[in-house]
Image: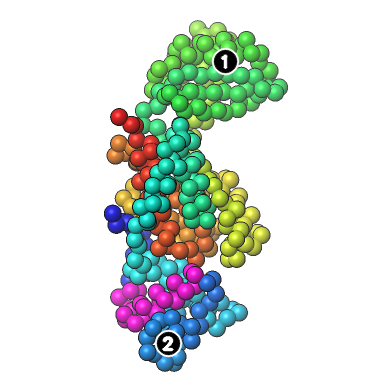
Amino acid sequence: MPVAVVSNQPDSSVSELSERAQHLLKVLTERYIREGQPVGSRTLARDAGLKLSPATIRNVISDLEELGLVSSPHTSAGRVPTAQGYRLFVDTLLSVQPIEASLVDEMRHNLEDEYSSREIVEKASSVLSDLTRLAGLVTLPRQQHASLRRVEFLPLSEKKVLAILVINDQEVRNSILETDRTYTLAELQQYSNFLNELFAGKELSAVRALLLRELRETREHLDRMMSTALQMADRVLGQAEQGSDYVLAGQTNLMDFEELSEVNRLRTLFEAFNEKRQILNLLDQCVESEGVQIFIGEESGYRILDECSLVTAPYSVDGQVLGVLGVIGPTRMAYERIIPIVDATARILSAALNPKD
Protein backbone atom coordinates (compact mmCIF):
# COMPACT_ATOMS: atom_id res chain seq x y z
CA MET A 1 0.00 0.00 0.00
CA PRO A 2 1.48 3.41 -0.98
CA VAL A 3 2.28 5.80 1.83
CA ALA A 4 0.07 8.92 1.95
CA VAL A 5 2.04 12.02 2.91
CA VAL A 6 0.01 15.10 3.83
CA SER A 7 1.62 18.40 2.82
CA ASN A 8 0.90 21.00 5.49
CA GLN A 9 3.12 23.61 3.82
CA PRO A 10 2.30 23.86 0.11
CA ASP A 11 5.11 25.56 -1.80
CA SER A 12 4.87 27.36 -5.11
CA SER A 13 8.63 27.39 -5.71
CA VAL A 14 8.50 24.16 -7.67
CA SER A 15 6.68 25.91 -10.52
CA GLU A 16 9.70 28.19 -10.89
CA LEU A 17 12.17 25.31 -11.20
CA SER A 18 13.26 23.59 -14.37
CA GLU A 19 13.52 19.80 -14.37
CA ARG A 20 17.29 20.21 -14.27
CA ALA A 21 17.11 22.42 -11.18
CA GLN A 22 14.73 19.99 -9.48
CA HIS A 23 17.08 17.11 -10.23
CA LEU A 24 20.09 18.96 -8.85
CA LEU A 25 18.18 19.93 -5.69
CA LYS A 26 17.17 16.29 -5.24
CA VAL A 27 20.75 15.06 -5.68
CA LEU A 28 22.15 17.76 -3.39
CA THR A 29 19.61 17.01 -0.66
CA GLU A 30 20.14 13.26 -0.84
CA ARG A 31 23.91 13.72 -0.69
CA TYR A 32 23.70 16.06 2.30
CA ILE A 33 21.32 13.74 4.16
CA ARG A 34 23.68 10.84 3.54
CA GLU A 35 27.02 12.54 4.26
CA GLY A 36 26.19 15.49 6.49
CA GLN A 37 28.64 17.76 4.67
CA PRO A 38 27.90 20.80 2.45
CA VAL A 39 27.83 19.81 -1.21
CA GLY A 40 30.11 21.60 -3.68
CA SER A 41 29.45 22.10 -7.39
CA ARG A 42 32.08 19.55 -8.48
CA THR A 43 30.61 16.85 -6.23
CA LEU A 44 27.13 17.73 -7.42
CA ALA A 45 28.17 17.56 -11.08
CA ARG A 46 29.63 14.10 -10.51
CA ASP A 47 26.63 12.77 -8.55
CA ALA A 48 24.00 14.25 -10.83
CA GLY A 49 25.02 12.22 -13.86
CA LEU A 50 24.37 15.19 -16.17
CA LYS A 51 26.78 16.50 -18.76
CA LEU A 52 26.94 20.00 -17.32
CA SER A 53 29.90 22.27 -16.82
CA PRO A 54 30.81 23.41 -13.29
CA ALA A 55 29.82 26.93 -14.34
CA THR A 56 26.31 25.76 -15.31
CA ILE A 57 26.01 23.88 -12.04
CA ARG A 58 27.00 27.00 -10.11
CA ASN A 59 24.41 29.06 -11.97
CA VAL A 60 21.64 26.58 -11.11
CA ILE A 61 22.75 26.48 -7.47
CA SER A 62 22.71 30.27 -7.40
CA ASP A 63 19.10 30.20 -8.61
CA LEU A 64 18.19 27.67 -5.90
CA GLU A 65 19.82 29.92 -3.32
CA GLU A 66 17.85 32.96 -4.52
CA LEU A 67 14.65 30.95 -4.09
CA GLY A 68 15.63 30.13 -0.51
CA LEU A 69 15.96 26.40 -1.19
CA VAL A 70 19.67 26.06 -0.37
CA SER A 71 22.14 28.06 1.64
CA SER A 72 25.88 28.24 2.19
CA PRO A 73 27.27 27.74 5.73
CA HIS A 74 29.79 30.38 6.76
CA THR A 75 32.68 27.94 6.76
CA SER A 76 32.10 26.27 3.41
CA ALA A 77 31.66 27.02 -0.25
CA GLY A 78 29.27 24.08 -0.52
CA ARG A 79 25.50 24.25 -0.13
CA VAL A 80 22.99 22.63 2.19
CA PRO A 81 19.19 22.46 1.83
CA THR A 82 17.11 24.92 3.85
CA ALA A 83 13.84 23.99 5.58
CA GLN A 84 12.06 25.26 2.46
CA GLY A 85 14.33 23.10 0.31
CA TYR A 86 13.58 20.04 2.43
CA ARG A 87 9.85 20.82 2.13
CA LEU A 88 9.98 20.89 -1.66
CA PHE A 89 12.12 17.74 -1.64
CA VAL A 90 9.65 15.85 0.57
CA ASP A 91 6.51 17.07 -1.20
CA THR A 92 7.55 16.74 -4.85
CA LEU A 93 10.91 15.04 -5.34
CA LEU A 94 10.89 12.18 -2.86
CA SER A 95 9.76 8.72 -3.88
CA VAL A 96 8.55 6.80 -0.82
CA GLN A 97 8.15 3.04 -0.97
CA PRO A 98 6.59 0.70 1.62
CA ILE A 99 9.08 -1.04 3.90
CA GLU A 100 9.97 -4.70 3.55
CA ALA A 101 7.37 -7.29 4.53
CA SER A 102 9.88 -9.03 6.83
CA LEU A 103 10.39 -5.83 8.81
CA VAL A 104 6.64 -5.29 9.08
CA ASP A 105 6.28 -8.84 10.44
CA GLU A 106 9.00 -8.17 13.01
CA MET A 107 7.34 -4.92 14.11
CA ARG A 108 3.96 -6.64 14.39
CA HIS A 109 5.47 -9.43 16.49
CA ASN A 110 7.08 -6.88 18.85
CA LEU A 111 3.73 -5.22 19.55
CA GLU A 112 1.57 -8.33 19.77
CA ASP A 113 3.31 -9.68 22.87
CA GLU A 114 2.36 -6.77 25.13
CA TYR A 115 -0.56 -6.78 27.54
CA SER A 116 -2.13 -3.40 28.32
CA SER A 117 -2.61 -0.52 25.88
CA ARG A 118 -0.04 1.49 27.88
CA GLU A 119 2.56 -1.26 27.42
CA ILE A 120 1.78 -1.50 23.70
CA VAL A 121 2.21 2.27 23.31
CA GLU A 122 5.51 2.22 25.22
CA LYS A 123 6.75 -0.60 23.01
CA ALA A 124 5.69 1.29 19.87
CA SER A 125 7.78 4.30 20.89
CA SER A 126 10.78 2.00 21.43
CA VAL A 127 10.23 0.33 18.05
CA LEU A 128 10.19 3.74 16.35
CA SER A 129 13.36 4.81 18.14
CA ASP A 130 15.22 1.56 17.45
CA LEU A 131 14.36 1.48 13.74
CA THR A 132 15.02 5.15 13.00
CA ARG A 133 17.78 5.92 15.55
CA LEU A 134 15.80 9.06 16.39
CA ALA A 135 13.50 9.98 19.28
CA GLY A 136 10.23 8.02 19.04
CA LEU A 137 7.07 9.28 20.70
CA VAL A 138 3.49 8.07 20.95
CA THR A 139 0.58 9.89 22.59
CA LEU A 140 -1.38 7.79 25.03
CA PRO A 141 -4.70 6.63 23.56
CA ARG A 142 -7.74 8.70 24.34
CA GLN A 143 -10.36 6.68 26.12
CA GLN A 144 -13.40 5.93 23.98
CA HIS A 145 -15.43 4.42 26.83
CA ALA A 146 -13.67 4.90 30.16
CA SER A 147 -15.50 3.28 33.04
CA LEU A 148 -14.29 3.76 36.60
CA ARG A 149 -13.81 0.36 38.20
CA ARG A 150 -12.54 1.53 41.55
CA VAL A 151 -10.54 4.17 43.35
CA GLU A 152 -8.03 3.51 46.11
CA PHE A 153 -6.13 5.85 48.44
CA LEU A 154 -2.90 4.87 50.18
CA PRO A 155 -0.84 6.91 52.66
CA LEU A 156 2.65 7.89 51.58
CA SER A 157 4.93 10.19 53.50
CA GLU A 158 3.60 12.91 55.76
CA LYS A 159 0.77 14.90 54.11
CA LYS A 160 0.92 12.94 50.87
CA VAL A 161 -1.57 10.38 49.55
CA LEU A 162 -1.27 8.04 46.58
CA ALA A 163 -4.51 7.95 44.58
CA ILE A 164 -5.08 4.96 42.26
CA LEU A 165 -7.78 4.94 39.59
CA VAL A 166 -8.59 1.65 37.87
CA ILE A 167 -10.31 2.35 34.55
CA ASN A 168 -12.00 -0.27 32.39
CA ASP A 169 -10.32 -3.61 33.01
CA GLN A 170 -6.62 -2.86 32.72
CA GLU A 171 -5.79 0.85 32.81
CA VAL A 172 -4.31 2.12 36.06
CA ARG A 173 -3.65 5.81 36.69
CA ASN A 174 -1.69 6.96 39.71
CA SER A 175 -1.38 10.45 41.13
CA ILE A 176 -0.03 11.96 44.31
CA LEU A 177 -2.15 14.34 46.37
CA GLU A 178 -0.65 16.79 48.82
CA THR A 179 -2.98 17.13 51.81
CA ASP A 180 -3.36 19.52 54.69
CA ARG A 181 -2.75 16.76 57.24
CA THR A 182 -1.60 13.16 57.55
CA TYR A 183 -4.25 10.48 56.94
CA THR A 184 -4.22 6.96 58.32
CA LEU A 185 -4.72 3.88 56.17
CA ALA A 186 -8.06 3.21 57.89
CA GLU A 187 -9.33 6.69 57.01
CA LEU A 188 -8.28 6.37 53.39
CA GLN A 189 -9.89 2.94 53.08
CA GLN A 190 -13.11 4.42 54.39
CA TYR A 191 -12.95 7.17 51.75
CA SER A 192 -12.26 4.60 49.02
CA ASN A 193 -15.20 2.42 50.06
CA PHE A 194 -17.54 5.41 50.12
CA LEU A 195 -16.50 6.58 46.64
CA ASN A 196 -16.62 3.10 45.12
CA GLU A 197 -20.18 2.63 46.36
CA LEU A 198 -21.17 5.89 44.67
CA PHE A 199 -19.26 5.77 41.40
CA ALA A 200 -17.87 2.30 40.55
CA GLY A 201 -19.03 1.21 37.09
CA LYS A 202 -19.96 4.70 35.89
CA GLU A 203 -18.43 6.42 32.86
CA LEU A 204 -15.41 8.50 33.84
CA SER A 205 -16.76 11.47 31.89
CA ALA A 206 -19.87 11.45 34.09
CA VAL A 207 -18.21 10.78 37.43
CA ARG A 208 -16.73 14.24 37.91
CA ALA A 209 -20.02 15.91 37.02
CA LEU A 210 -21.70 13.74 39.65
CA LEU A 211 -18.97 14.61 42.12
CA LEU A 212 -19.42 18.32 41.63
CA ARG A 213 -23.18 17.99 41.98
CA GLU A 214 -22.79 16.01 45.20
CA LEU A 215 -20.43 18.62 46.59
CA ARG A 216 -22.68 21.50 45.56
CA GLU A 217 -26.13 20.15 46.40
CA THR A 218 -25.49 18.13 49.53
CA ARG A 219 -22.60 20.00 51.14
CA GLU A 220 -24.72 20.96 54.15
CA HIS A 221 -25.65 17.34 54.83
CA LEU A 222 -22.21 15.78 54.32
CA ASP A 223 -20.23 14.69 57.30
CA ARG A 224 -16.49 15.39 57.37
CA MET A 225 -15.58 11.97 55.98
CA MET A 226 -17.88 12.24 52.96
CA SER A 227 -16.80 15.80 52.19
CA THR A 228 -13.09 14.95 52.35
CA ALA A 229 -13.55 11.85 50.19
CA LEU A 230 -15.45 13.77 47.52
CA GLN A 231 -12.89 16.57 47.47
CA MET A 232 -10.03 14.08 47.10
CA ALA A 233 -11.83 12.31 44.27
CA ASP A 234 -12.48 15.64 42.55
CA ARG A 235 -8.77 16.48 42.60
CA VAL A 236 -7.77 13.06 41.26
CA LEU A 237 -10.28 13.15 38.42
CA GLY A 238 -9.25 16.70 37.60
CA GLN A 239 -5.67 15.52 37.16
CA ALA A 240 -6.83 12.56 35.05
CA GLU A 241 -8.66 14.90 32.70
CA GLN A 242 -5.78 17.33 32.21
CA GLY A 243 -4.89 16.99 28.54
CA SER A 244 -3.12 14.09 26.97
CA ASP A 245 0.31 12.64 27.50
CA TYR A 246 2.93 10.81 25.49
CA VAL A 247 5.69 8.30 25.99
CA LEU A 248 9.14 9.01 24.60
CA ALA A 249 12.03 6.72 23.76
CA GLY A 250 15.51 7.25 22.35
CA GLN A 251 15.93 10.97 22.98
CA THR A 252 19.65 10.37 23.60
CA ASN A 253 19.92 9.28 19.95
CA LEU A 254 19.75 12.98 19.08
CA MET A 255 23.13 13.52 20.72
CA ASP A 256 24.70 11.63 17.81
CA PHE A 257 23.83 14.38 15.31
CA GLU A 258 26.33 17.20 15.04
CA GLU A 259 23.68 19.81 14.23
CA LEU A 260 21.86 19.05 17.51
CA SER A 261 24.81 18.22 19.74
CA GLU A 262 25.50 21.73 21.07
CA VAL A 263 24.93 21.52 24.83
CA ASN A 264 22.49 24.42 25.23
CA ARG A 265 20.41 23.29 22.26
CA LEU A 266 20.19 19.75 23.60
CA ARG A 267 19.29 21.01 27.07
CA THR A 268 16.47 23.16 25.68
CA LEU A 269 15.17 20.31 23.56
CA PHE A 270 15.22 17.83 26.45
CA GLU A 271 13.46 20.37 28.67
CA ALA A 272 10.72 20.61 26.04
CA PHE A 273 10.40 16.81 26.06
CA ASN A 274 9.97 16.87 29.83
CA GLU A 275 7.62 19.86 29.93
CA LYS A 276 5.59 18.31 27.06
CA ARG A 277 3.13 21.16 26.42
CA GLN A 278 4.68 22.43 23.16
CA ILE A 279 5.23 18.92 21.79
CA LEU A 280 1.65 17.94 22.67
CA ASN A 281 0.27 21.07 21.01
CA LEU A 282 2.12 20.11 17.85
CA LEU A 283 0.94 16.51 17.99
CA ASP A 284 -2.66 17.66 18.50
CA GLN A 285 -2.45 19.33 15.08
CA CYS A 286 -1.84 15.91 13.53
CA VAL A 287 -4.85 14.10 14.99
CA GLU A 288 -7.13 14.87 12.04
CA SER A 289 -4.50 14.03 9.42
CA GLU A 290 -5.32 11.11 7.13
CA GLY A 291 -1.72 10.14 6.51
CA VAL A 292 1.85 10.96 7.43
CA GLN A 293 2.32 14.63 8.33
CA ILE A 294 5.71 16.31 8.52
CA PHE A 295 6.86 19.52 10.20
CA ILE A 296 10.26 20.68 8.97
CA GLY A 297 12.31 23.24 10.91
CA GLU A 298 10.47 26.45 11.69
CA GLU A 299 7.20 25.05 10.30
CA SER A 300 6.49 23.76 13.81
CA GLY A 301 6.12 27.29 15.12
CA TYR A 302 8.40 26.53 18.08
CA ARG A 303 11.94 27.91 18.07
CA ILE A 304 13.27 24.94 20.01
CA LEU A 305 12.43 22.77 16.98
CA ASP A 306 13.91 25.06 14.30
CA GLU A 307 16.67 22.53 13.60
CA CYS A 308 14.37 19.50 13.85
CA SER A 309 11.76 17.67 11.81
CA LEU A 310 8.75 15.86 13.23
CA VAL A 311 7.25 13.01 11.18
CA THR A 312 3.86 11.84 12.49
CA ALA A 313 0.89 9.61 11.71
CA PRO A 314 -2.38 9.04 13.61
CA TYR A 315 -3.44 5.65 14.97
CA SER A 316 -7.01 4.50 15.51
CA VAL A 317 -9.30 1.86 17.00
CA ASP A 318 -12.60 0.92 15.34
CA GLY A 319 -12.17 3.79 12.91
CA GLN A 320 -11.77 6.43 15.64
CA VAL A 321 -8.44 8.23 15.97
CA LEU A 322 -7.09 7.75 19.49
CA GLY A 323 -3.64 9.30 19.20
CA VAL A 324 -0.57 10.20 17.19
CA LEU A 325 2.89 8.68 16.94
CA GLY A 326 6.05 9.90 15.29
CA VAL A 327 9.73 10.65 15.46
CA ILE A 328 11.74 13.79 16.13
CA GLY A 329 15.18 14.23 14.65
CA PRO A 330 17.32 16.72 12.76
CA THR A 331 15.99 18.21 9.52
CA ARG A 332 18.77 16.16 7.92
CA MET A 333 16.96 12.85 8.30
CA ALA A 334 16.47 10.03 5.79
CA TYR A 335 12.86 10.89 4.94
CA GLU A 336 12.48 8.12 2.36
CA ARG A 337 13.15 5.57 5.12
CA ILE A 338 11.57 7.36 8.09
CA ILE A 339 8.19 8.08 6.46
CA PRO A 340 7.25 4.44 5.68
CA ILE A 341 8.44 3.30 9.14
CA VAL A 342 6.18 5.84 10.84
CA ASP A 343 3.29 4.93 8.55
CA ALA A 344 3.71 1.18 9.13
CA THR A 345 4.06 1.61 12.91
CA ALA A 346 0.80 3.56 13.03
CA ARG A 347 -1.02 0.81 11.13
CA ILE A 348 0.47 -1.96 13.29
CA LEU A 349 -0.27 -0.09 16.53
CA SER A 350 -3.87 0.41 15.40
CA ALA A 351 -4.20 -3.31 14.73
CA ALA A 352 -2.60 -4.22 18.08
CA LEU A 353 -5.00 -1.97 20.02
CA ASN A 354 -8.15 -3.08 18.20
CA PRO A 355 -10.11 -5.60 20.25
CA LYS A 356 -9.63 -9.18 19.12
CA ASP A 357 -12.67 -11.22 18.22
Residue 57's x, y, as percent? Answer: 42, 87
In the image, taking residue 236 as reference, residue 350 lies left or right, namely: left
Q: How is the image coloured?
A: rainbow
Residue 82 seen in the figure: yes
As rendered, which of 29 and 355 lies closer to the eye?
355
The three-letter amino acid code for the residue at tag 1 is: Thr
Q: Residues within 10 Å of mark 2 (few under 14, many from 20)?
A: many
Residue 336's x, y, as percent? Answer: 40, 63
Q: Quadrant of residue 292?
A: bottom left
Residue 246's x, y, as percent? Answer: 49, 42
Q: Please name the residue that numbered disc 2 is placed on.
A: 57
Kindly identify the residue that appears in the image at 54 percent across and 23 percent down: 164
Q: Which mark is residue 91?
A: none
As rendered, which of 6 and 257 lies closer to the eye?
257
Residue 280's x, y, as percent? Answer: 48, 46
As rendered, which of 299 and 101 lies closer to the eye?
101
- Helix, strand or loop at mark 1: helix
Span of residues in magenta: 13-34
Residue 139 seen in the figure: no
Vertical order, 157 against 58 (above or below): above
Q: Quadrant of the C terminus?
A: top left
The three-letter amino acid code for the residue at tag 2 is: Ile
Kindly identify the residue that appears in the image at 33 percent across and 74 percent down: 14
In the image, taking residue 17 as reference, residue 154 lies left or right, namely: right
Gap between marks 1 and 2 measured at Cα: 76 Å
- Confirm or deny contact between disc 1 and disc 2 (CB under 8 A): no
First-in-chain label (1 vs 2): 2
Q: Please name the residue that numbered disc 1 is placed on.
A: 228
Q: What secondary structure is the magenta-colored segment mainly?
A: helix
- Helix, strand or loop at mark 2: helix
Q: Quadrant of the N terminus?
A: bottom left
